[in-house]
Image (cartoon, rainbow, N blue to C red):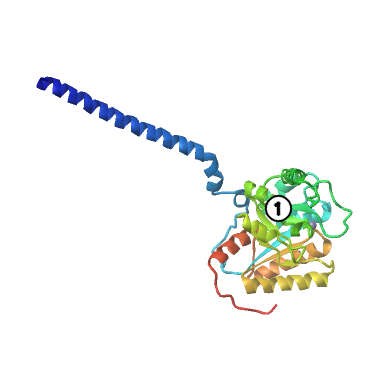
């Protein structure tokens, strides 16, 4: 009925059809895959950033062969920076790396902070937050628990945009805000988006700052010692001693001080002395990195009474 030639031709046509269909299906699969990848790009990228702001803006420690990397590390954070011009300048002239945390309503912030960063200091933004009790010194950009979500976010973003080059924020005052989980969650989400770290100043023992930051996946830690709660040289000297003991006990310690005569004068003398004793002065980001590492690699620490 059908000639051999005819059967051969039909077979060849069928083969061509099958091959084309397979090829087409492959292309369709590829297109689908590409579309899916394209669609995923905005979702994947923020998670894949391997150099967030807190790392990108951190001070790189230049070690030399005599640097003992196992030495106890101390970070000195001077906050309330920028208002008291005389003592802020003296703080900027301390031997680097000090961590300097600037109030967003201080003047000439872009120039001032750029210069401080060039001198080898690490930068932070000192975020004004509501305290418990009556405080007359609230700036209009202070983060208050009474603000609506939109207002809170507006103030936060406005403050964060005042200058650049910082690794993260620590709270100025904030004893009330640090206990308000809902407001803190909003703050942490914005910081996470910007790749910043959160240092809890611990102005209240009930602070939820550090734990909320951790919940949102932020690099975070807390202040160990306040240097100048009382502005006397005796108080500062005792605090510095306490700081050394903390660093010996835990391997790391973070102090917060202020641009005050008593603090800067004491630090000028203490920094070279503590380095001779074998401590390392580091920017705050270095301690955050170390504590993240230690949390995932716990070791037995020798207990020393402080
Ligand atoms: Zn402050």
List x then y, in percent, for residue 67: 57, 65
**Figure quarter occupied by ligand 1:** bottom right
Residue occupying the point 36% across, 31% down: 27
Q: Which residue occupies the extreme front position in the image?
A: 1
List x then y, in percent, for residue 203: 77, 62
Quarter that holds the C terminus? bottom right
**Which residue is under mark 1?**
124
List x then y, in percent, for residue 20: 29, 28
Quarter that holds the N terminus? top left
| Residue 283 found in image quarter | bottom right
SS assignment at label 1: strand
Residue occupying the point 70% across, 50% down: 186
275 vs 56: above or below: below
Is residue 142 at least partly visible in the picture?
yes
List x then y, in percent, for residue 227: 77, 66
213 vs 270: above or below: above
Residue occupying the point 56% across, 75% down: 300
């Amino acid at each position: 009925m059908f000639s051999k030639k005819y059967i051969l031709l039909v077979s060849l046509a069928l083969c061509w059809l099958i091959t084309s269909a397979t090829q087409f299906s492959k292309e369709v699969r590829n297109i689908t895959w590409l579309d899916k990848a394209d669609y995923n790009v905005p979702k994947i990228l923020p998670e894949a950033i391997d150099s967030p702001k807190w790392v990108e803006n951190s001070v790189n420690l230049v070690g030399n062969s005599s640097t003992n990397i196992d030495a106890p590390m101390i970070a000195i954070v001077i906050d309330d920076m920028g208002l008291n011009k005389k003592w802020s300048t003296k703080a900027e002239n301390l031997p680097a790396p000090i961590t300097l945390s600037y109030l967003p309503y201080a003047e000439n912030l872009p120039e001032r902070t750029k210069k401080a960063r060039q001198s080898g200091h690490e930068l932070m933004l000192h975020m004004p937050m509501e305290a418990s009790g009556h405080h007359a010194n609230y700036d209009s950009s202070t983060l208050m628990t009474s603000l609506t979500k939109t207002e809170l976010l507006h103030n936060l973003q406005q403050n964060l945009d005042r200058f650049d080059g910082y690794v993260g924020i620590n709270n100025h005052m904030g004893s009330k805000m640090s206990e308000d989980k809902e407001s803190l969650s909003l703050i942490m989400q914005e910081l996470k988006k910007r790749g910043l770290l959160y240092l809890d100043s611990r102005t209240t023992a009930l602070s939820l700052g550090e734990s909320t930051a951790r919940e949102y996946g932020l690099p975070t830690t807390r202040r160990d010692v306040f240097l100048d709660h009382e502005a006397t040289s005796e108080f500062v000297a005792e605090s510095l001693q306490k700081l050394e003991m903390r660093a010996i006990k835990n391997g790391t310690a973070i102090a917060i001080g202020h641009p005050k005569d008593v603090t800067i004068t004491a630090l000028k003398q203490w920094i070279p002395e503590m380095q001779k004793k074998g401590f390392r002065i580091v920017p705050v980001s270095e301690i955050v990195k170390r504590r993240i590492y230690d949390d995932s690699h716990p070791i037995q620490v020798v207990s020393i009474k402080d």
